[in-house]
Amino acid sequence: MSYFGGLGAGKGWNTFKFILTPAEFESIFKDLNYYFIITNSRVEIDYTKTEKQFVFDSYKDFFNAILIEEKKVEEKEQWSFESKIRISIIDSLSKIDFEDIRDKKGKISNEFKLVRPIEPVINISPLYITSYKNKESLSISVYNTEGTIGLELNYPKFVSFAPDFETPIETNSFDTYNLFNLLIKNIKSISNKAKVQSDTKLFRPNFWISPDAKKVINQNHYIKTNNLYII
């Protein structure tokens, strides 16, 4: 089974943006029932899940090489780190199906397959910040790889399932919705709403940051280049 999420007209996405150190990121999952899975690309034929430590180690690399890097990182190099933390989360592997990949002649691949969750998953993606000096404004909703500073969790508010994809279903009845809220609760317990100071203005963008992350995030290339300071 497959589904569509983010259906628009008030049926989009629940999102939560944050900056944590690698140790803190790992800590928010403590004592929770969860699994990391790849849903945005094909996987090897014997794939069942992504090992948790691989994700935690990948975030540590992403944090050190991208988030707190003082020099501009080329997009190709950034993707080598970013692609590993673009992962999905689900509460049970029993909610995962797999789909064969067929070539143009209908032959089934014996190397790769697709992951097909039967319930909505939580997605992890990068958090970007963009400064518009001429407008004295700041955005955290625009795609801007140079301004990568953290992570975002997103979870659909409604989904529609195959085969017709016609009937929207609210997602707050699924267990993964509860997992989404528990993760947010754990992040908030060790962080607070960020403030960003520019040369002329104090911004209050809607993301959270921990005290330990504040100690190092301001060495980020984009933050320094644009004379911003996260407080």
Image: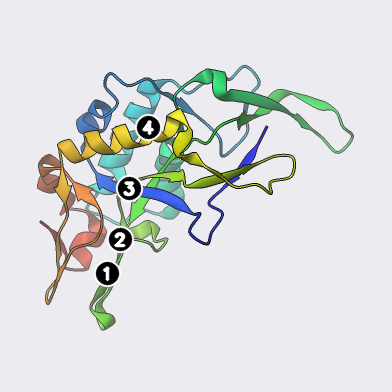
Residue identifier under label 2 = 129
Q: Mark 2 or 1 closer to N-term? A: 2
Depth check, mark 1 against mark 3: the one in front is 3
Q: Is residue 98 left or right of residue 163?
A: left
Q: Mark 3 or 4 closer to N-term? A: 3
Q: Is residue 127 visible?
A: yes
> Any mark on residue 138, and which?
1
Q: Secondary structure under badge 2?
A: loop
Type of amino acid under label 2:
Ile
Residue identifier under label 4 = 178
Depth check, mark 4 against mark 1: the one in front is 4
Residue 1's x, y, as percent? 68, 32
Verify CB contact (< 8 Å) between mark 2 and mark 1. Answer: yes
Type of amino acid under label 1:
Leu
Q: Nearer the viewer, residue 21 or 89?
A: 89
Residue at 63% across / 33% down in the picture?
42
